[in-house]
Image (cartoon, rainbow, N blue to C red):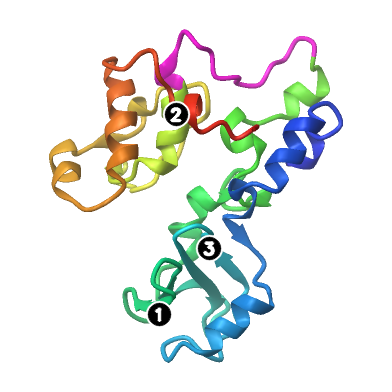
């Protein structure tokens, strides 16, 4: 139903979310984005439609000659304030790659850009229709693996579904991520990446850190 439908009853949480990074991890490019892109030797003069990322890197989406949205092979590094070359033309299809974590809603047509309420709490139509009896997923404290599964579905990368997809198609908040996703832990340990997310989420999923979940430190509602 989209995050706007959550606002009337959850106004405090909504007000925090709309100004937080999750809501803006996929956004319409602003003037600063367009000015910066014009300085890129790789991607200047492209008709960009979306900007991906916020904190560490920013990438851009533009239609190709057939109108298919693709991720451009350039990346703005916020730490070094410089451009990196990433991949080659024509770039990956946005709907098959980045969209899985940067949009909210069923595929192939997402409900909203960014990580909305339903990305973490599950589809909200039933809850909106009958909020007293139909509850959205609410991160139960006695099931830390379910909370870690929600965060891990995007933040713990490097797994495969049974169908060979590198994104957890079929995962819904409230279920165990390991039921639809398989990780090659050995390869993850050897690779560069977000080792903080990897080790913490892995520990919770394995049951060796049962008193701690991601939102214990990273509360998206505060």
Where residue 90 is drawn, which disc sits there?
A: 1
Where residue 115 is drawn, which disc sits there?
A: none
Question: Relative to residue 181, is residue 99 depicted above or below?
Answer: below
* Disc on the earlier residue, 1 or 3: 3
Residue denoted by label 2: 214
Badge 3: residue crowd in 10 Å (few <14, some 14–19, many ≥20): many
* 62 sits to left or right of 134: left
Alpha-carbon span between mark 2 and mark 3: 23 Å
Q: Quadrant of the C terminus?
A: top right
Q: Quadrant of the N terminus?
A: top right
**Residue stretch rendered in magenta on the structure:** 132-146
Alpha-carbon span between mark 1 and mark 3: 17 Å
Q: Nearer the viewer, mark 2 or mark 3?
A: 2
Badge 1: residue crowd in 10 Å (few <14, some 14–19, many ≥20): few
* Disc on the earlier residue, 2 or 3: 3
Residue denoted by label 3: 52
- For image coordinates 66% across by 36% down, the residue present is 117
| Towards the viewer: 116 or 67 | 116
Question: Was residue 127 drawn as part of the magenta stretch in this picture?
Answer: no
């Amino acid at each position: 139903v989209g995050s706007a439908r959550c606002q009337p009853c959850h106004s405090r949480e909504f007000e925090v979310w709309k100004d937080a990074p999750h809501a803006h991890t996929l956004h319409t490019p602003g003037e600063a984005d367009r000015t910066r892109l014009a300085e890129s030797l790789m991607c200047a003069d492209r008709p960009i439609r979306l900007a991906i990322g916020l904190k560490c890197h920013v990438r851009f989406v533009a239609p190709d000659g057939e109108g298919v949205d693709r991720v451009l092979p350039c990346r703005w590094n916020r730490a070094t304030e410089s451009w990196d070359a990433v991949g080659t033309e024509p770039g990956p299809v946005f709907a098959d790659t980045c969209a899985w974590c940067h949009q909210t809603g069923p595929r192939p047509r997402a409900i909203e850009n960014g990580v909305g309420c339903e990305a973490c709490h599950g589809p909200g139509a039933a809850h909106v229709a009958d909020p007293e009896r139909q509850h959205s997923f609410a991160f139960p404290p006695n099931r830390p693996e379910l909370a870690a599964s929600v965060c891990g579905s995007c933040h713990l990368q490097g797994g495969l579904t049974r169908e060979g997809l590198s994104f957890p198609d079929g995962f819904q908040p409230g279920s165990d991520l390991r039921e639809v996703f398989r990780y090659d832990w050995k390869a993850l340990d050897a690779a560069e990446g977000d080792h903080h997310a990897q080790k913490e989420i892995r520990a919770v999923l394995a049951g060796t850190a049962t008193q701690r979940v991601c939102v214990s430190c990273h509360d998206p509602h505060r």
